[in-house]
Image (cartoon, helix red, strand yellow):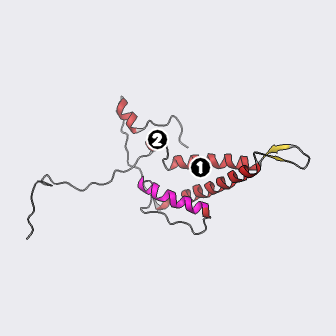
Amino acid sequence: MPRGRPPKPSTVHWLNGDPSRTRRYEVEPSGAAGLPDKPADLGKVASSKWDELVPLLSEMRVLTRSDAEVLRLYCETFARYIEASKSIADGGMTTCNDSGTVAKSPYVAIVQDCSQLMAKLLIEFGFSPAARARMRMKAPEAKPVSKWDGKLKVRRA
């Protein structure tokens, strides 16, 4: 986890200006190009979460083949979170021991742990404005434009 204050989102930074004149958009190393393959042994809930996230992350241009294990960890944690949440909904937040004492359900701790891990992993993929401001991405390469583009009429025989 990065230390210190999270950077401002780009739009706020541009509006306020930069008195230190530091460069903001460095090129970082990137992973292997392409989308990761879905693991065959994912459960039903984790598999549907994978199918939901891969197009979204691909559209954001943050997903590479090397992100497969992190995405798998998120999807499996999400499935565990859903299962524990259903158990809490069915049995309640507390349980009764053999001696008759009331204790907190173990599923509550599972939900808390899963939600913390999912929040950290979502930040890694840039699912918040501050996380996106922290990300440094290479701009898509533009095709070279001729000064004559769109000005000359082309006749085809």
- The amino acid pointed to by label 2 is Pro
Point out the image quarter for the N terminus: top right
Q: Residue under circle 1?
A: 118
Point out the image quarter for the C terminus: bottom left
Of residues 4 and 13, the one drawn nearer to the viewer in this rendering: 13
Pinpoint residue 26: horizontal percent, then vertical percent: 38, 45
Q: Earlier in the sequence, mark 2 or mark 1?
A: 1
Q: Is residue 15 visible?
A: yes
Residue 61 to residue 156: above or below: above
Q: CA distance from mark 2 to mark 1?
A: 16 Å
Residue 57 colored magenta?
yes
Q: Residue under circle 2?
A: 129
Q: Does the magenta stretch mainly form a helix, a strand or a loop?
A: helix
Of residues 87 and 23, the one drawn nearer to the viewer in this rendering: 87
Residue occupying the point 51% across, 61% down: 51
Label 2 sits on a secondary structure element that is helix
